[in-house]
Structure formats: C-alpha cells, structure tokens
Image (cartoon, coloured by chain):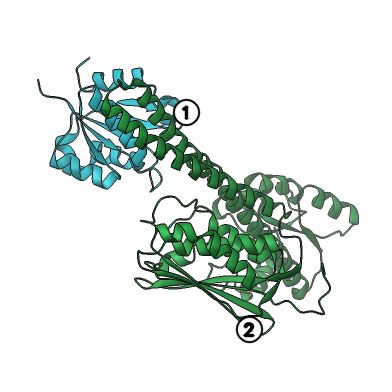
Amino acid sequence: MNPAAEPETLLVIDDDYAMRLSCRKILAKLGFQVETCENGVQGLEAVARLKPALVVVDLKMPGLSGMEVIPRVREISREIVIVVITGYATIDTAVEAMKSGAYDFLPKPFSPEELRLIVNRGLERRRLALRSRQAEMERELLKRRFVSFVSHQLQTPLVAIHQYLSVLKRLEETEDAAAKRREWFDRCLKRIEELQSLIRDWLTLAKLEGQCLAQRRVRVDLRQTVDNVLAGNAEIAAANQVTLESRMPEECAVRGDPNCVSVLVDNLVANATRYNQPGGSATVSAETVGEEIELAVSDTGIGIPEEYRALLFDEFFRVEGAQPGGTGLGLAICRKVVTEMGGSIRVESEVGAGSTFRVRLPAWREETPEGA
Amino acid sequence: MSAAKLLVIDDDRDYRDSVRCLLESEGFTVVEASSGDEGLRLLVEDPPDAIILDIVMRCCCEGYGVNQALKFRDEYAGYRDIPIIMASSIEQSPDELFPMAGEVGMIRPDYYVTKPLDIPRFLEVVRRAVGRS
C-alpha cells in the first residue's frame, strides 16, 4: 500500500452487533478507515456515500439480504471488492454470491487472521485492476494525441503548399509574380521534403512498433558507420558552418542491427549538425565501458534546458524555439532502436554550451554466435 | 477610403506569406504575427479592422486563447468588436467545433474558414468582416 495515500475505506454490513464490532477492531488495526451498518438498506446508502474500496457483507440479514445487496453494490461501482460472510457455509450459497459479483467468502466462524488475509488479498487485486485501468487510459490518450498530432503535422505543410500554388495561380503575370514564383517554388519543395522526412520517420517508428526492424544481431563496425554518417551529413554541415569530427578508436564494434545502428548515429549527428551554431562543431567519440561501448555525440549548440530533458525522447516533442524542419520523431526513434538492441541512451547538456548524447550498446565479442 | 488593415496570426511562415500576398493583391494592408502573444501585442499597438486567426499553433490551441482573451479580458475591452475570422485545417462545421459555446463561456468566432483556403470564399468573408462587401 502507498503510505502517502489516504487510508482506504472499508464498510462492514452485518446485523450482528458483536460481528460489526470485532470486524471493525481487526480491520482498523490494519490502518483502514472502517464504517459499519446494521442492515442492507443503510449499507447501500453508505456505499453510495462513501464509495468504499471493500465491503464485507453478511449474507443472512433481516430485510435486504446480502445476496440482494451484492448486485446493487456492483451497480454503484464495479471497483468495490465484495467479501461475503456466510453462517451456513454451503458451497452453493458461496458460489451463487460469487457468481453475482462477490470476490470471496468467509464462513462463520472465522479467525481474525482469515479476515485480514482475505481483505488484503481483495484490496491488492483491486489496486492492480485500478493501476492497469489507469495505464490503459494513459495509452489510449497517447494514441489519440498521436493521431491528432500526426494529422496536424501532415496537414500543415500540405496547406502551405496548396496555398502557395493557389495564390500563384491567381497572380497576374508581372515581374513581381515571376520573382515570387521562383521563391515560392523553392519553399514548396522544402515543405515537401519536410513532409517526406516526417512520413519516413513515422514509418520507421511504425516498423519498430511491429518489431520488424532491429532483428539482426551481427558485428557492426561503429567506426565505419560513423565515417559513413559523417560523409552523409557533410553537405548540410557545410551549409550550417559546422565542423564534423570523428574521434573513434581503431577497433570499435557493437552487436546489433547494422541498419538500426546507422539510423541511430545518423539521427544523432543530424541533430548535432542542425541544432548547432555557425562556427560550431559536432564530435563523435566512443569508449569501452565494461561489456558495452559508449558512443558520445557532442555538439556546441544552445543546450537543452533541464525541464525538457525528460521529454526529449518522446514522440513529437520539440524544444520550444527550436528551428523548424525537424519532425520531432528522431530521438523517439533513437530510443526505440537502442532499447530494441538492449542498450540505453541519455543526454547531458549545459545551456549555452552544448549537449552530449551518450548511447550504450553491447560490445561485439568474437565468441558471441551470430544471431544469438 | 484607406485600405482596410488585417492582422494575420499564424505560426506557419509560408502560410502567412501566401495569405499576405493574396490580401495585398486585393488592396488590403496586412500585419503578421507568428504567435498568439505577438498577435495580442500588435493588436493593441495598431488595431486592425479584422483578425485572421489560426486555431492550432505551437502551443496547441493558442488560437482559442486569443479569441477568449479578446472577448473576455478587461484589458482588451476596447478591441472586443474587432471581427475574428478563425482558420483551421480541422474539417468540422463550427457548430460541431463550438457546441458548448454558451455553456463553457466559449465564444464562437465571428467567421470560420477551413484551410487550405477556398480563395474566392475567403475573400468574400474578409470583405464582409471589414464591412466592405
């Protein structure tokens, strides 16, 4: 039980005064808030008012019987755990009570220990159910947010392109219009590229979701991968006036999927190049740490404020004020890829000085059989 | 009669650019803001004849915020009557988008258009908003 949380409320419904008293005593000692009622009608009223976590109800009471109380409690809330007390412990009545929604039954006479055990077990099950429902709701929310986010992200560039073209179509054939046309065509192309990279990233993520990407476990030469990635980013680095540098050791191999390692390093280097400043540098290095290789990609960019660091690897999260052009999916992909391959990723950053992304992947061992 | 002035609040530079070009070619004066905050500031500095307001900006539904601020906050009391044309790529009728209008104190915008803009219709709405149709 979470000690910081409010004590759970339990309700005992029994026409027998001695029984109410002893149940209250036993359960209150466990730290619960315990209320008692002497008949079914008062009991139901209390259930509606208190929304208890658990109800202990005697099956045999004058007036509204325990068997009649069970379905009505379920109507009020299906999350309330119901334990029935039965004086004539036949299997039949117990089964009937459980069929109509009771969690378990206690045959009279029972020991304090039996009551404690059954109550704790019932409450534990309820907590588990509540937690899994909470998790389910959070997943659902995330999914809904994902869909609306993606549709907005896809719509925005399309709207911009559509609008450029439809306004261009209306413009009279003037010198001005010719100049605009040249400029706007370029911008349309940029937006199309933005859209393409969004779709590409999204597909990568979707494939990872289905786990059909990071399947291979082979020797990946990290030094070679870094060289290839740096070559691939040379053009954009030159445009941003950022120097790319590899400080990789001679021998450096990890165990993983070559394509995934490539995607990972490329995303990190592309970020270090994009979120940098003119005259800055992006450096890739690596060292062996125990059974793992730690790859470090450092930039001399604006840094990431502390409050954003935890959110950085979430889908579509973008640091406020970041330059446009990114899809907000790159680091989410990195995290997925790294996790798939049994590694980890974290970030160190100093605002105004730059950031370093550190990835750990299993080091390649010659004796490791391929595909294991 | 001087040209009617329009304030375009939208976080997409390309979209603002094309709307500006379109409106200027129709004889309007255009002022641009790239966020709700900037929009509210410019509005006070130099009140426009109408506002063209994007709903979903960087801070999610910033456009609603601008709309609410203008209609409800005392500091904007003097600008309450400036017509607002809300624009969004959400393809839903305003009735569905603003079903709870009265109940939750949400004010329906004066006009609502969907993106990408249907140009003739958009121009008609703009002219109606500034009272020059």
Residue at 57% across, 63% down: A229
Q: Work out which quarter of the rendered image holds the C terminus of chain A and state it.
A: bottom right
Quick check: A19 above or below B75? below
Residue at 48% across, 55% down: A317
- Estimate the spatial distance between the alpha carbons at disc 1 and disc 2, rounded to whole Å: 54 Å
Q: Measured from the top left, where is residue A353 in percent x and y?
A: 37, 73
Q: Quadrant of residue A215?
A: bottom right
- For this rendering, which residue is in front, A236 or A115? A236
Q: In this view, does A14 lie to the left or right of A93?
A: left
Q: Is residue B22 left or right of residue A113?
A: left
**Residue type (three-letter) at the residue carrying disc 1:** Glu
- For this rendering, which residue is in front, A139 or A187? A187
Q: What element carries label 1?
A: loop
Q: Which residue lies furthest to the top in this view?
A: B133
Q: Measured from the top left, where is residue A268 in percent x and y?
A: 53, 64
Q: Name the residue under label 2.
A: A289
Categorize mark 1 by other alpha carbons within 10 Å: few (<14), some (14-19), many (20+).
few
Q: In which quarter of the image is residue A125?
A: bottom right
Residue at 76% across, 62% down: A216
Q: Is residue B85 left or right of residue A12?
A: left
Q: Mark 1 points at which residue?
A: B91
- What color is chain B drawn in? cyan
Quick check: A148 above or below A224? above
Q: Measured from the top left, where is residue B110 in percent x and y?
A: 29, 26
Of discs 1 and 2, which sits in the foreground?
A: 2
Quick check: A324 above or below B20? below
Q: Do the residues labelled 1 and 2 touch (CB within 8 Å)?
A: no
**Residue type (three-letter) at the residue carrying disc 2:** Val
- What color is chain A drawn in? green
